[in-house]
Amino acid sequence: MRYGATGVNLEIDLSRGNIEKVETDPKMTELFLGGQGAGAKILWDRVPPDTDPFSPENLLIFSAGLLHATPVPGANRVAVNTFSPQTNLMSHSLMGGFFGPEMKHAGYDQIIIRGKASDLVYLYIHNDTVEIRDATHLRGKGCTETGDLLKEELKDDKVQVAAIGLAGENRVYTASIDHGHSSAARGVGVIMGDKRLKAIAVRGTKDINIAHPAELFDISMKMHKRISESEGCGDWMAYDEDDSFHHNHFAWGNARVRRIDFWSDELQERWTKLKYDHMDRQTSCYNCPKNCRNVIKWPGRRRFGYKCYGKDTYHMAAFKELDFSYDILGVAQEYGLDSYSTPQVIAFGIELYDAGILTDKDMPDFPEDSGDRVWYLMEKIVRREGIGDILADGVSLAAKRIGNGAEQYDHNTVKGFEQLPIKLGKVNPAYFLMIATGEKMSITQIEGSFPQDPIRDMKERQAFVDKWDAVPDQKFKDYFMNWEKRNLMPTQAFCDIVDWNEAMHYIDDSIGLCGFVSSFRGQFGGDIAYHINNIPEFIALATGMEMDKSILWKDFQRIRNLVRAVNVRRGLRRKDERPPEDHWAVRDEEMEQNLLTEYYKFKGWNDQGVPTQETLKSLDLEFIAEDLVERGILDENGNTPVENEPAVIEKN
């Protein structure tokens, strides 16, 4: 009997209309857990490295976390993996809500989709009943609209629906997959659209076998209470109306302009009233006591939901205020557009117009008002009309197609993907390493365990450290206590900190935990729910697997190196690992490259960032080492030839 995991994957071939239920090897769970780890292993095994993202052979994988559908609170993030046409690399996305646990209750750990349907279809799953159904009547429908229509069609208001909107149908590269008011973005919606899969509707009523149910229930109920009462858990921005951090410190427009004195008490009071005058409710995800998502009903628009920085991106791109975001989000989310990257793409187009690189010929009847311009380009992008057909590919690829100096305005992407628009002074070495070497497309999927800055008051710093239960070992407390300036710390310390940050995200994304009760919240306070010291007990009680901190840390290293190898096999090399050139005002190329070299050594990678044979073999990844040697990516000395190696995004 399998515990925790169902032990069954659902295989869908849309080209042939074939459906299979496949039992999985328990060893996969032991080595790769679930979620992100399982998705990466399936992509390695089954998608050759020269496969075009738009090939029918590319897979779209929905992976439930290992702890989904167990009593463990906050375990609700489903991983969605594929290969992105925007980057040609593995696309990693997460989606909260109820979809992942519902998959498990239906009996499946992964839903693996290959091929392409001849026309628009949706997938209906109700326990053992699995059907590919016609969805042409849903063409052009919005994401939540599609969910509502399918619940009515299926006569089941408990069915959980993940759907694409018009952006996904038209293969916009920044298209998302939406479930309720949760979104999976960063390269996955475009592939769902390419496969002509409008939606997946899941209903599950099966029990999940737990190895030690009474013990797991007991510690889960205690954790539920702790999360509920802790100020260190959840998205604080759902309740705290002071959003000066994003507005004063993040860049506006095309990630260019800092407005450091934008925020004011008067503005905060006005925006707070705007929010609560139009709030429908605050909602939580599956089995979580925190209501982190604000649901807004704006006049004339469908309800939409947001978390954290998601409410700011459109009005900051347009140099407008919160009412602009509230007006546009109800439309943009129905289209299924990622609210982090799409506004940057739009602002990029506006800046090119202002610079004369794009003209009235490219943008006929382009409005004067900045907000109207955002609406104009969003409608063009989502329909791939005119200039929108170029901008729909994202900033980096659009800049290459436009030419005429447009590439100088592509200044906020890494590996071809738009980053958060943060512009700072001196290089922060830890963040340099995370942004450069991260393979999850956003710094928010990497940072979070270690604070961003030292606490100046030493008594406050000591108090922080005294309750810091999340640290893997004492050295992190020592690093923090001895830290004086953001950019000054021993290189070993920066390597350790980045490694810990990554560890928690890779673990969370494989077992399905939300970062707001785990990996992302540690930087803001010591009192977080889940960490490397207590997660092993939850896994052991749920699955019956042998588990402790050292085993879990090795699981992280194994999954991290697997993801690295997946991308290395598709062409990722050192030259691709550069933060945006103006991300920091003061740059030191020699220091940065030395730092990168030391981090590669720390990770057990060679000077091109390729895991060595020794590293791979120590992590039970001999099959990867053999493959990389056979392909000439590693030679007998563990080196990687770099002659004529193209940059990743040039492969598109």
Image (cartoon, grey):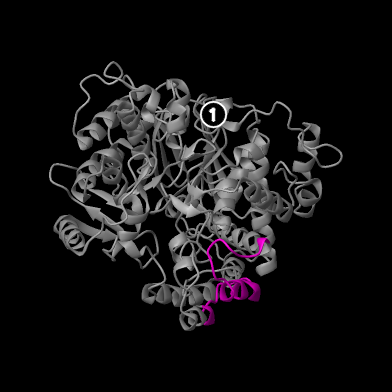
Rendered location of residue 346, percent (x, y): 33, 34
Up-down relation of residue 623 to residue 516 (above or below):
above
The image shows residue 326, relative to residue 466, as above or below, that is: above
Describe residue 598's horizontal placement relative to residue 5 as left or right. right
Answer few, some or many: residues within 10 Å of disc 1's Cα (few below 14, many 20 plus, some between 14 and 19): many
| Image quarter in which the N terminus is found | bottom right
Quarter location, residue 370? top left
Give the number of callouts: 1
| Secondary element at tag 1 | loop
Q: Amino acid at mark 1?
A: Pro
Q: Is residue 396 visible?
A: yes
Q: Quadrant of the C terminus?
A: top right
Residue 307 makes an appearance in the image: no
Compared to residue 123, the image places residue 299 above or below, namely below
Q: Position of residue 631 (x, y in %)?
A: 77, 31
Report the front residue among 6 and 453.
Answer: 453
Q: Is residue 94 above or below residue 344?
A: below
In magenta stretch: residue 344:
no
Residue 68 x, y percent position in the rendering: 49, 58
Q: Is residue 490 magenta?
A: yes
Question: What residue is shown with label 1?
Answer: 53
Task: Farthest residue to the right: give it.
Answer: 636
User: In this picture, which residue range is highlighted in magenta?
Assistant: 465-491
- The quadrant holding residue 349 is top left
Can you tell which quarter of the image residue 57 is in? top right
Residue 100 x %, y %: 45, 51
544 vs 144, left or right, is: right
